[in-house]
């Protein structure tokens, strides 16, 4: 990868506008160092700039993956024939055994999937990484290597995640602490009641660890209906008592899609600035997207696992995830599809805490060009990425990483 | 398009086998005229045959679209900015007005979408076509032109569909009769209670028309829960009384996904050989796929509308539809993903009544080659179609129609 980058003028691109169809003005973007310097119809080329003609393509900000599992993926490997049982615990045990017995290399696999994300326009990404008493920090080390390798172009947050449970596997809490000390940015957690078996004890341990290491929390909460709501209330109590407002993401939160009257709970989620993450699974209840946004809750999108021993589905393409979010919530109008796109762009950056995001001057220069007439069109058609710029560098053209990345 | 085709040997292809991963034997397929003559490891080239090397790709039967609306699509046109209201009646009225005011050309549009279906491997297709008192048979005429144009390669069934209601728009029943006389293969119907306002009257009129013209029925039943179940029971009564067993498809059937105990109703559906069609919408209840299959019900898949004034979603790719079916029903195992594929192949052919379907000798030579290791892999990865053969002719390579189609 080249080290310094010359200033660049990306000319002849169109800005999205959900309300005015496809008669929008052409603009240019000047990029100096890793930042957008200016954007608009009459932007001059910076001195010594390379000029890149955007050919009238639609300009989007780099995409944000809010929740994936880089350390589980089988992306690029031979097809894995899935014969796994139907329960969460079947999947957890099967995967632990698979990775142990095959010498699965989380470094190689996370790098393959990260590169595919980047080629498809994702420039910021939050990944959970399993930490357990079988594997210790082995997967974390692999993903840390990938983060180092791609540090100049892919902004990656790592969540230390107790996939096999925490309280039920003694020693896991210490490993999670070690993971945070070794470079993980966020403390993960998993189903305090239905996996760990002790919602109060599990949440107390999680919040204590987060406090000790000064880290935010991102919890997988699959617990359904009333039990999920019970756990969520316990979690909100601790956010409030410990001053963790704005520092907690609840991933999945299926319970919020299944309660007859979730409003009071949602209002409290909003007040405590807890963000919600959804992969918009079509076979599970999901938090009410529009109601959440009306209440001011940040709700972000993510793929969850991509082609692993859990699930054969998924591609590292946030436009496809936005499409699936749109379909799950039956979003058909252009202004509604812009909401689906927000879930994998600005809202995801906000929920994860990625700074300097967007298309305004001063933002990190993460840009994607696609041949589409509107954002809605880009979401449903998922066209090839003509150009991807990350942190001020052109990293991919026509879906293929450029030399050096 | 060339008129006669030389015999062909498609060599070096692999057959799908959900149970044995990717160590399957290579086979060849000989095609004479429009038919598969032989398939197996030691098939000889017929006299004067062209030999086509499949390069070890996976061989699939041509895909079957069980339910689409060729006469509504905006495929290939400028992006339509959707600002339509949320109700079924909003969408019906908006579309009727849109097509009326824009001079929408159902011939041109249905041809564009049919060609895209073919390039992506669909060789049999059932389309509903709107018949109403504003447009008369105008859309039908356009789709009939498309059917004629592609008659040598695409096997198309047309359903005469009262999209704006039948009883509530007097004169529609006569137009439906005219449509059947003019070449429509199947009589359509729409929500006898919630659109037509008279479930008994509407169903009686539909079955009377079907009987008069000797045609099967394919009804859109969006009616939810108990009202849908009520209408469905009335429909089954008429199937039984009029001897229409095996000649009725119920499309959508959301009600069957929302009843607390659907078994008795499903058993009756099975007994009367009524098939169910689902697009597997992630935001609506859906008939229970596995339970239906256990009971012997044919359940088939379809896209429903593709990029029209109703919905921005959809692509003419039955592998993607199979993927969406798989996701909707949370099918993760390889043997379950083979069921999702069945919904857009053999089960769809069976439900629609397309004859001579499959990969056995004597079947119509409709073949698709993809670079995938298994059927499950093909469904989730949706790889480019290396080769499509329809009715014994090569019609597309690498996703692009060949000269003459």
Image (tube, coloured by chain):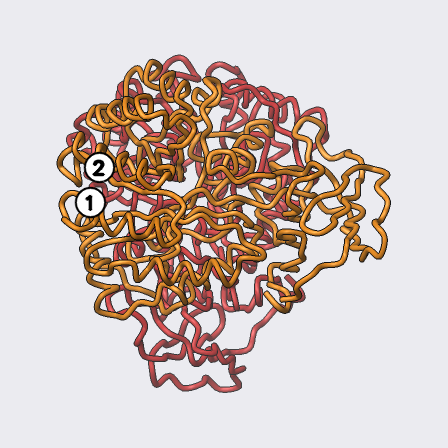
Chain colours: A orange, B red
Determine if marks 2 and 1 fall on one subunit: yes
Does residue B143 sit above or below B198 in this rendering? Answer: below
Mark 2: secondary structure: helix
Residue at point 13%, 37% (across, down): A197
Residue occupied by mark 2: A205
* Apparent side of residue A28 relative to residue A133 in the rendered image (left or right): right
Kindly report the distance in space between the C-alpha atoms of the residues bearing marks 2 and 1: 9 Å
Residue occupied by mark 1: A166
Does residue A28 sit above or below A335 in this rendering? Answer: below
Q: In x, y percent, where is residue A63?
A: 56, 45
Badge 2 density bin: few <14, some 14–19, many ≥20, Cα 10 Å: some
Which tag is nearer the camera, tag 2 or tag 1?
2
Mark 1: secondary structure: loop
Q: Look at the image and tell me in which quarter the C terminus of chain B lies.
A: bottom right
Residue at point 40%, 16% (across, down): B194
Find residue B186 and report its image quarter.
top left
Task: Answer whether residue B238 is visible to the viewer in this image.
Answer: no
- Of residues B53 and B137, the one drawn nearer to the viewer in this rendering: B53
Q: Earlier in the sequence, mark 2 or mark 1?
A: 1
Q: In x, y percent, where is residue B243?
A: 26, 35
Q: How many marks?
A: 2
The chain to which mark 1 is attached is A
Badge 1 density bin: few <14, some 14–19, many ≥20, Cα 10 Å: many
Residue at point 45%, 67% (across, down): B365
Find residue B402 and report its image quarter.
bottom right
The single residue placed furthest to the front in the displayed view is A212
Task: Answer whether residue B256 is visible to the viewer in this image.
Answer: yes
Does residue A45 sit above or below A338 in this rendering? Answer: below
Q: In x, y percent, where is residue B315?
A: 53, 46
Circle on res. B257: none
């Amino acid at each position: 990868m080249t080290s310094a980058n010359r200033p660049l003028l990306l000319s002849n691109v169109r800005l999205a506008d959900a309300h005015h169809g496809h008669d929008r003005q052409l603009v240019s973007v000047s990029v100096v160092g890793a930042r957008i310097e200016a954007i608009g119809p009459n932007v001059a080329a910076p001195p010594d700039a390379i000029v890149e003609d955007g050919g009238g393509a639609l300009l989007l900000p780099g995409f944000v993956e809010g929740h994936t599992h880089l350390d589980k993926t089988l992306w690029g490997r031979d097809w894995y024939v899935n014969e796994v049982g139907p329960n969460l615990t079947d999947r957890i045990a099967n995967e632990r055994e698979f990775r142990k017995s095959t010498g699965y290399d989380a470094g190689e696999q996370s790098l393959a999937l990260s590169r595919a994300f980047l080629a498809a326009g994702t420039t910021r990404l939050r990944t959970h990484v399993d930490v357990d008493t079988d594997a210790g920090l082995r997967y974390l080390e692999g993903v840390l290597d990938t983060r180092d390798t791609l540090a100049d172009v892919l902004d990656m947050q790592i969540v230390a995640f107790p996939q096999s449970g925490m309280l039920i596997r003694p020693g896991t809490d210490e490993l999670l602490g070690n993971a945070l000390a070794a470079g993980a940015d966020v403390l993960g957690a998993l189903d305090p009641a239905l996996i760990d078996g002790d919602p109060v004890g599990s949440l107390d341990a999680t919040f204590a660890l987060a406090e000790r290491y000064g880290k935010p929390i991102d919890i997988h909460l699959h617990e359904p209906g009333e039990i999920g709501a019970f756990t969520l209330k316990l979690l909100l109590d601790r956010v409030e008592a410990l001053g963790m407002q704005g520092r907690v993401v609840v991933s999945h939160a299926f319970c919020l899609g299944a309660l007859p009257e979730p409003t009071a709970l949602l209002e409290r989620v909003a007040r405590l600035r807890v963000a919600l993450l959804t992969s918009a699974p079509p076979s599970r209840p999901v938090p009410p997207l529009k109601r959440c946004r009306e209440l001011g809750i940040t709700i972000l999108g993510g793929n969850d696992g991509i082609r692993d021993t859990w699930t054969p589905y998924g591609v590292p393409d946030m436009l496809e995830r936005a499409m699936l979010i749109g379909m799950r919530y039956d979003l058909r109008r252009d202004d509604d599809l812009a909401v689906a796109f927000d879930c994998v762009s600005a809202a995801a950056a906000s929920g994860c805490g990625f700074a300097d995001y967007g298309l305004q001057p001063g933002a990190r220069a993460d840009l994607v060009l696609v041949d589409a007439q509107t954002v809605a069109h880009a979401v449903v058609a998922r066209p090839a990425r003509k150009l991807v710029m990350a942190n001020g560098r052109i990293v991919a053209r026509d879906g293929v990483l450029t030399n050096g990345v």
